[in-house]
Amino acid sequence: MPMVIALAGNPNCGKTTIFNALTGARHHVGNWPGVTVERRTGTFEHEGLQLEVVDLPGTYSLSTRSEDERVAAQALASGEVDLVLNVLDASNLERNLYLSTQLKELGKPMAFVLNMVDDAERRGIRMDLKAMETLLGGPVVATVGNREEGVEELKTLLASLARGETERCRSIAVDYGHDIEGELRKLEGEIQRDEALAAAMPPRWLALQLLEGSPAAQATLATSHARAAIGQQLSKSQAFLEQHLKEDVATLVAERRYGFAHGLVKEVATPAAEGKTPTARLDAILTHRYLGIPIFILILGLIYSVSFILGKIPQDWIAEGFKSLAAVAGDHLPPGELTSLLVDGVIPGVSAVIVFVPVIMILMGCIAFLEDTGYMARAAFIMDRLMHVMGLHGKSFIPLIMGSGCNVPAIQAARTIESRQDRLITILVTPLVSCSARLQVYIVIAGTFFTPIKAAMAIVAMHFLGLGLAVLMGRLLRSALFSGPSSPFVMELPPYRLPVLKSTVVHMWEKGSVFLTRAGTTIFAGATLVWFLSRYPGIANAEWTEQYLQQRQAVVALQLPQAETDSRLRDLELARESRIVNSSLAARIGQKVSPLLQPILDPDHRRPEAWKDVIALTAGFVAKEIVVSTMAVIHQASDEPKPGERLSPLQVSLRDRSGLTPLTALAFMIFTLIYTPCLGTVAMIRREAGSWGWAGFSIAYGLVLGWGLAWMAVVVGRWMGYA
């Protein structure tokens, strides 16, 4: 069996970067806390040995008061972990060492990674690694994780430890003083009466956890056959310590740990150079009380504009490629339903999504760049004030920001929130944040009905509308369903760093590859299903087909110029396809549901084919990407743009034949933003909230809120004179 190495450390210490460097994995790395929210595993080989690495959630302590702390503590205390690799941020060493004192109490062999030494050196901090090894009781390797400096030395060390060369790993524990140590020994003695309990976790560790009042330790104690004796001794020890020391035991233990960390740093590190750091100078501007939010909005608008401008060139290439593919398939495959499925269903459905991958990848690359620099943590800090005003937990903004990529991992990120009420509120409002799947819908709709500048403004507005609604719904949920104030939280602001190009490119590719994977699975299946629903039962009257064939023959018999003949034949084909679609199962389903959305999509009752948009929105419940592919199939997106136009065939069809106006298009975007989470998000809400009731509630309130705001947009727009 390979040695199992658990990576442990504070949030934002570079733990996942080290994990990626060791295992070759490509998990998301961001310069802000809360990126890793569950354990991940990977393996690597070195010097003929295979080692398994477990990346645990970043945590400041092992008190198990939040979900991420519970996951980390359970894994570290279990027998499956052979070695703890504690990753330390060299520029914030004293703060990081508090967790190290708890890890040493587990009694497992430990090694240390002093990461980000380049940041520390820039601040004038120098470390004595030999002294650190002596005081911490374990080998120390200095690294710069994002540049993979020191990683080979770390692999060599881990391989030597796997071979049993553990003489550098020594047991060192914090001395908590005569009184606390005496009570710990008494508790350890009682715990050791239960051999199974003592074998499951170190008795000293469990005794300390019980003295500190850990809920997880209390739950473990409840399963022991010696719980009565242990509980009796615990009560005596707590009463004795509080009576003699006049202080809460948890506070006294924490003070000793901080004292150990402070003394160790004094011994091994030279102090930072005096003067205002570059980070402090930048923060004076970027987190300014009044300038911070306008700068944030400006940066968002800039990255969206850059994404659209740079992404348009590869978009055109991809669109031309799919157009040629459809033409080749139509010319060389025999006529029939399978050819129609490919040419009219799969190719336009998949291409309508794939064509926006360049924009998504560039956008995600920009966001990855901002995350790696440390700016996104500042954005969370800027918005944190607003979050507290609205009654949400300060940590809640981290999942909300992550939701701009995908709501599913964003909901997982809520595990870092200690309070169950705050965690539930965050889970329920996160789906309101506009994800990258919805972004495709905005690009199609806004790019069709608005000028480029207005389109960029509309898309940015959708994102801020989602964030604003999340905050307002958080306030409402706090008032109506969850009583009590939110828990206090101090937002960590990591130092600014220059991102490594490799990391940014990898993250950009990860996001783009998600859409490529979905195009081959979910979107392919969705396009196929929509094609089937839009084709069958098809034209029930055989006379329609006969009439169509006669009309084709009549056009050919006119012997007009080839261009005019082709144009007339194309018009006949479009009319035939329209007739088929309008008599299909999709039309019947859409027409049944249309009255519910008519006030939004067709307020003047002038769009007999508004049901097509209803079908697209209904398909979006499975995955929001399917909205675009469904529109491409059901609107028969084959129209050619005019010379000089930079529109896709779908956008031309929407503009010329859908009947949507800029106002109803805006309402469509608002409804898409809010109306219901996708199926994957609903499943994650059920998993994290522990109830289908909360998952159903998120669907219900989203539908009501989405309909109401979209309707208000139409009403207000018409009142202001917009058609």
Image: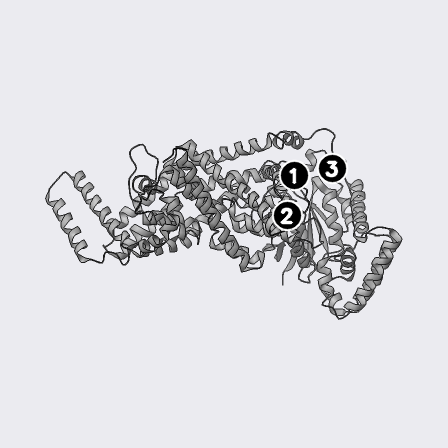
Task: Give the residue type at disc 3.
Answer: Arg
* Residue at the extreme front: 719
Task: Give the residue type at disc 1.
Answer: Leu
Q: Is residue 526 left or right of residue 145?
A: left
- SS for callout 1: loop
The one of 706 and 442 positioned closer to us in this rendering:
706
The one of 458 and 8 positioned closer to us in this rendering:
458
Q: Quadrant of residue 310?
A: top left
Q: Is residue 244 above or below residue 558?
A: below
Residue 115's spot in the image, x, y percent? 67, 43
> Marks 1 and 3, Cα distance to the nearest angstrom?
22 Å
> Marks 3 and 2, Cα distance to the nearest angstrom?
21 Å
Q: Residue at x 72, y 33 (%)?
A: 124
The residue where tag 3 is placed is: 126
**Mark nearer the viewer, 3 or 2:** 2
Task: Give the residue type at disc 2.
Answer: Lys
Residue 53 visible in this rendered orientation of the protein: yes
Q: Is residue 168 left or right of residue 70?
A: right
Q: Is residue 67 left or right of residue 698?
A: right
Q: For the image shown, how many numbered marks are present on the structure?
A: 3
* Residue at the extreme bottom: 225
The residue where tag 2 is placed is: 15
Residue 233's spot in the image, x, y percent? 83, 64
Q: Do callouts 1 and 3 mark residues in contact (Cβ within 8 Å)?
A: no
